[in-house]
Image (cartoon, grey):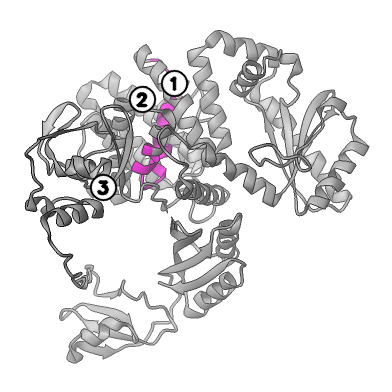
Amino acid sequence: MGVKGKGSATELMAAIKKQANGDAAMLEPACSFASEKLAKKGKEWAEKKLEHSLRAASILSEFGFDNATITAAVLHDTTANNLAELGEIESRFGKEVSEILSEFGKIRSIEARNYGRIDNQLLSKIILATAKDIRTIFVKIAVSFDMLQKPEGHPKGNVEKNALIALNIDAPICHKLGLYELKGMLEDASLKTLNPEEYGKIKQLVGKKREDREREVQDAAREFEKLMQKEKQAVTIEGRAKHFYAIHRKMQEQRIPFSEIYDLAGIRVICDSTRQCYEVLGIVHSLYEVIGNKFTDYIANPKKNGYRSIHTVVKWKNALLEVQIRTWEMHYENETGLAAHWQYKNYEKDRLFDKKLTWAKQLLEWQRKQKGKHGVMQGLKMDFGQNKIFVFTPKGEAVVLAEGSTPIDFAFAIHSDLGNRCEKAKANGKFVPLDYRLDNTDVIEIITGAKQQVKRQWLNFVKSSKAVTKIRQRLGIKPAKKAKKEKQSLTTTDKTVRIARCCNPLPGDEIVGFRTTKRKTTIHRAECPNIKTMPKDKVMRVEWDLAKKDYSVDIKVRVRDSPGLLPQILSIFEKANVSINSTNAKVNPNSTATCTFNVKISSLPQLESLIARIERLPNVFSVERA
């Protein structure tokens, strides 16, 4: 993946522009900015770093990531080497880019401090929780992958550590998010770095280039598609060639020679019903020579983890081809069920986190299919952490706390008595004040005093409800009444007329204008509750200019968490040719989810039509204009 054999910045930029289908508007300004900043450490070093950054950007453009992500990849070495400030990045390239780079820096720091010190699965979870914008994860992965592809110029120790992280952290994250091709590429590159002899051995045994193997698999998939069409079987067929690392791992785990691996190439047939699975199996077995001892029916006899599918191996053009047959329901369960492996010591399985992974994966799958269309990999938000941080006891036990928590919150989370007698605290071996804000992966030690008492001032800085409750109980303070939330003030822009963000009116809505100054007017829906609070002499009647124009609108959809629902919703927008600016999914503990889509709409009837179509989907509770 990426642009192989093209090292110059000019060639790389040309390739990225071609791959990005024009979605690389900031590429040249970003390259100029990066080149200027990197040159502070020497021309030769700067050229190598810029080419590295552009190769990472090329990988992202091939996978369909948007302008902001590509730009962040180009600029990552300027902030990573303290050659540019995030504020300067934001003013030149926008808030999205600066936020991705800010999260990128945090993740690299967490990884550097904690890889090898804590459980890999827990570290993966902390990394995901830190990245509120999931595009940050893929900037990190693209940067790491390029280092493995082009290790020249990087210290050997750094490259080897990077290979271990790619293998144990990055590749599993790609798997959870359904980016199987990228996962395989990372694993192969890591194997080549860490065990070049084994990599060379497997490469020789396979005897074909990956491009040729992929081409053969796609030929097989096309042949099966024609066959199924002829037999009037409406199915979906996917193909894949096994990666070198997967071959290596199978040989090691099952202790078998290369000659006994029968799934070097495979296709997956996805059906609408269990009955159709067996009909397809009958067709395959009637037309191809079957390897008898390689047939397994996991539909009739599921694996212990619930995996269901039919596996069979047939001869195809002097080669062996594994065929997997399953329904869509089985497919989603098999794929999302793998998230159950996100378990680690001292923790129960986090079902809510697993569901968030599933939704993020479905969003990524859909957005990747839109390459060349609107909304490619853009504005994808999935808050895995829900503003949580992970800290550790001196014994290495993880404790989950709210962002902004203090040593007092930590002490009460461990035990009420520890909180009551907390006198001093250490973070990472150094004394810190009791109002110190804990950071991800801090190691916290609480020092108690026999005569220590709870302090009233602790209530001014503790974060957790448990700490507040315990402190109040200890001091004999009754719970205070909740204060009413103050209304937020509206923001304004420099335009003479602007659309109010509080109600986002559309053509077809009855509207009014509110004069904010002599020259500026804000347009509201007539029923907007904010109108009632405005001076009547500043409210005027206005009408729409019916010239064609798109308007941003938020659509909020509440659903029951169910396999395949999200792609159905997204396909409605696609069929209506509606551009999606951003997608925000929140998965709730009660098996429901709330998705907010910011979309471009031209009129009220178009919006009403979209809402009606989404409402008709099964497992949709409500659809509303936010």
Q: Which residue is mark 2?
A: 115
Q: State the CA–CA distance, disc 1 to disc 3.
A: 29 Å
Say which quadrant the C terminus sits in: bottom left
Residue placed at 23% from the left, 20% from the top? 42
Up the image or down, 94 lies above or below 340; here it is below
Mark 3, residues whose alpha carbon is within 10 Å: few (<14), some, or many (≥20)? some
How crowded pointer 2 is (Cα within 10 Å; few <14, some 14-19, many 20+) is rated as some
Above-or-below relation of 116 to 270: above
> To which residue does mark 3 refer?
403
Give the residue type at disc 1: Leu
Q: Which residues are magenta?
A: 126-152
Q: Is residue 146 visible?
A: yes
Q: Earlier in the sequence, mark 3 or mark 2?
A: 2
Which residue is farthest top?
Answer: 197
Name the secondary structure under disc 1.
helix
> Residue 559 colored magenta?
no
Kindly identify which numbered label has been placed on residue 164: 1
* Horizontal side, residue 207 vs residue 398: left or right: right
> What type of secondary structure mainly makes up the magenta span?
helix
Q: Nearer the viewer, residue 379 or 587?
A: 587
State if disc 2 and disc 1 touch (CB < 8 Å).
yes
Sequence-first disc among 1 and 2: 2
- Which kind of residue does numbered mark 2 sit on? Tyr
Q: What residue lies at 40% left-to-right and 34% top-to-bottom?
A: 346
Q: Which residue is at the far front?
A: 450
Residue drawn at (76%, 23%) of the image: 262
- Mark 1–mark 2 Cα distance, whole angstroms, equals 9 Å
